[in-house]
Each structure stands twice: as C-alpha cells, then as structure tokens.
Amino acid sequence: MSELELYRFITENKIEWVRVKNKGKEDLLMLVGLDDIKTVLEMFNLHFDDNMECFLGYSYIRIWMKAICERYGIEMENVFID
C-alpha cells in the first residue's frame, strides 16, 4: 500500500473522512461505505481478527487511520488533504 494508492482509492470512491482526536492525539476517521469494505480489507491486507479499532454506523464503518498509515509508512498529511 502506498500513499498514491490510498489517495486514489479515497478520491475515486469519494470516501469521506474527518480529523479528530483519538485518546488525546491527532487522528483521522475514514468513513467507508459497506460496499467498499472488502476493497479496504484487501487493500490494507487486513482481516476481521486483526487488532483494528473501527465503528459500525448505519451504512458505513469508521476506521481510525493513524495506526494503519504508520503500519505502511504513509504520511496522513500527504493523502488526506483538506
């Protein structure tokens, strides 16, 4: 997973995201529609039994991105541009 691949996925699929504090530290929540969950799991090589904190909403899952970006050496500021 590269910064460019993540950026393309976000822009092409119109993925929403928001900057928030997570346990007092700067983080980012990516809001992934249920139709895109399989793609996200494959993209990050994640499995439901991995230790990843996320929240299920009515029609989306919110995923904390800081830990995932750190895992892949991705600078969030290069991907999630305001």
Image (cartoon, rainbow, N blue to C red):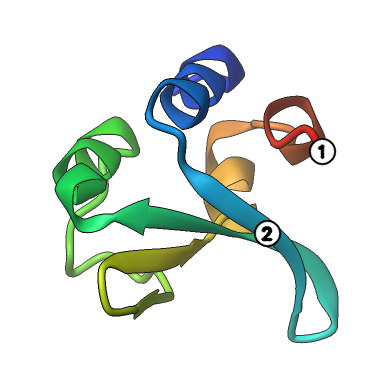
Nearer-the-camera pick, 7 or 46: 7
Label of residue 82 in the image: 1
Label of residue 69 in the image: none
Residue linked to disc 2:
18
Residue 77: x percent and y percent?
81, 35
Residue 32: x percent and y percent?
36, 53
Asked whether disc 2 touches disc 1, contact meaning CB atoms under 8 Å apart, the reply is: no
Query: Residue 27 sits in which quadrant?
Result: bottom right
Q: How many numbered marks does the figure carry? A: 2
Q: Secondary structure at mark 2?
A: strand
Nearer-the-camera pick, 66 or 15: 15
Q: Residues within 10 Å of mark 1 (few under 14, many from 20)?
A: few
The answer to whether 48 appears left or right of 57 in the picture is left
* Marks 2/1: CA–CA distance: 9 Å
Q: Which quarter of the image is occupied by the C terminus?
A: top right
Q: Secondary structure at mark 1?
A: loop
Q: Which amino acid type is marked by label 2?
A: Val
The answer to whether 36 appears left or right of 55 in the picture is left
Q: Is residue 9 above or below residue 24?
A: above
Residue 68: x percent and y percent?
52, 49
Q: Earlier in the sequence, mark 2 or mark 1?
A: 2
Q: Which amino acid type is marked by label 1?
A: Asp
Residue drawn at x 58%, y 57% as measured from the top left: 67
Q: Residues within 10 Å of mark 2 (few under 14, many from 20)?
A: few
Residue drawn at x 43%, y 75% as measured from the top left: 53
Query: Residue 26 sits in which quadrant?
Result: bottom right
Residue drawn at x 77%, y 26% as measured from the top left: 78
Nearer-the-camera pick, 79 or 75: 79
